[in-house]
Amino acid sequence: MKNRIYIAIVIRLVTLSALAAAVGGLINSCSDLTNLPNTSPDDNTIIKWKVYSTSNSNIASNYVYSLAVDQNGAIWVGTENGLSKFSGNTWTTYRTSNSEIPGNVINAVIVDRNNIKWVGTSSGLAKYDDSQWTRYTVSNSMLPDNQVNALAASGTGEIWIGTENGLAKLVDTEWTTYASGSQTYYHAVKALAIDSDGAIWVGTSNRLSKFNGISWSVYGTGNSGLLDNNIWAVAVDVNNIKWIGTSSAGVTKFDGSTWITYRTTNSGIRSNTIMGLTTQGTNIVWIGTAGGGLNLRNGSSWTYFIRSNSIIPSDNVTCIALGAGGDKWIGTAGGLALYNENGID
């Protein structure tokens, strides 16, 4: 029987300044949110959206890079200025000034099978068991680079770490690195996902790689249906279908044999710059874009949420995490949003 894989994919794709340049200065602040739709059209008592920003909460920063939900239901929010935990109605923020976290720029955060939090920063990797921090840097471990961009945890205890200078795997205290000798080609790893066969999919700035534990396969514009080699997000759904987000050519679906790409010209997606991906069930994909807000593909239908039709705090959506009861946590360049189409408790 195949192991159940616990996947948490989080990624800091670009810096604030790089994103502003990429989307023409479309960074929006969490402001002017009144008089926008937040209720069901036929039931005004149902509140579907809630926004958290530095002006109404103790979140560390409005720019959210990464999200994860732990086994107790707490949401972990990686920002440009610290890691925030939101549990119940309480915020706790971890920075270098009050914890052993190695850096304040939080590019990635995941929760493993033992509810341990793994935090990728621009200054190293951290492990946190809710009481003690363990730090990993190039000086005390085999971490290939201190800038950690992406993380993934398997159901068998492997922690995969994508850095600016290659890929690493940590199992208990044993490290394996994949850098200059591997076929990740361009070694700045931006996205990670583990499929149902246990293979790791590695999104880089120069093609998509798959490693099955023995051999590498590499996919790019020259040998696959990908239309862009710059891979910013990867997700795997329950049917083992891979969803690949690119920097300029939309999102591509790969079922192992057929490649289908969804762009603004052939689908309802609002932007071709994909910043985050999360799958839900068999047919639902949540897509965070630069400038095009939050996009939902449900079967063959498309829905989008932008500032003009919702109270989402920014049209630049960096990451999405699924919570209990149908909650969707949405990280943006202007704050954190909570959305539930059935109403927020």
Image (spheres, grey):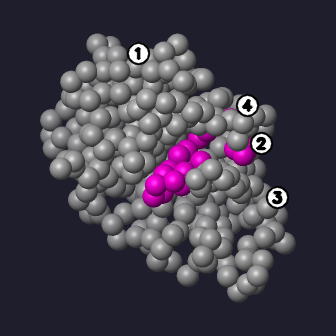
Residue 122 on image: x %, y %: 45, 37
Of badges 1 and 2, the one in the foreground is: 1
Q: Residue 21 got which mark?
A: 4
Q: Is residue 55 left or right of residue 243?
A: right
Instruction: Name the residue beneath numbered marker 2.
Output: 26
| Magenta part of the chain | 268-287
Q: Badges 4 and 2: C-beta atoms under 8 Å apart? A: no
Of badges 4 and 1, the one in the foreground is: 1
Q: Residue at x 23, y 42 (%)?
A: 158
Q: Which sits in the foreground, 281 or 164?
A: 281
Q: Secondary structure at mark 1?
A: loop
Q: Was residue 281 drawn as part of the magenta stretch in this picture?
A: yes
Q: Residue at x 59, y 66 (%)?
A: 338
Q: Residue 308 got which mark?
A: 3
Characterize the local packing of mark 4: few (<14), some (14-19) or many (20 or more) Cα atoms within 10 angstroms.
few
Instruction: Name the residue beneath numbered marker 1.
Output: 185
Q: Is residue 116 left or right of residue 313?
A: left
Spatial CA distance of label 2 from label 3 is 14 Å
Q: Secondary structure at mark 4?
A: helix
Task: Say whether residue 127 is visible.
Answer: no
Of badges 4 and 3, the one in the foreground is: 3
Taking 269 as reference, is 247 above or below it? above
Spatial CA distance of label 4 from label 1 is 26 Å
Amino acid at the residue labelled 2: Leu
Q: Residue at x 59, y 23 (%)?
A: 228
Q: Is residue 172 left or right of residue 57?
A: left
Characterize the local packing of mark 2: few (<14), some (14-19) or many (20 or more) Cα atoms within 10 angstroms.
some
Amino acid at the residue labelled 4: Ala
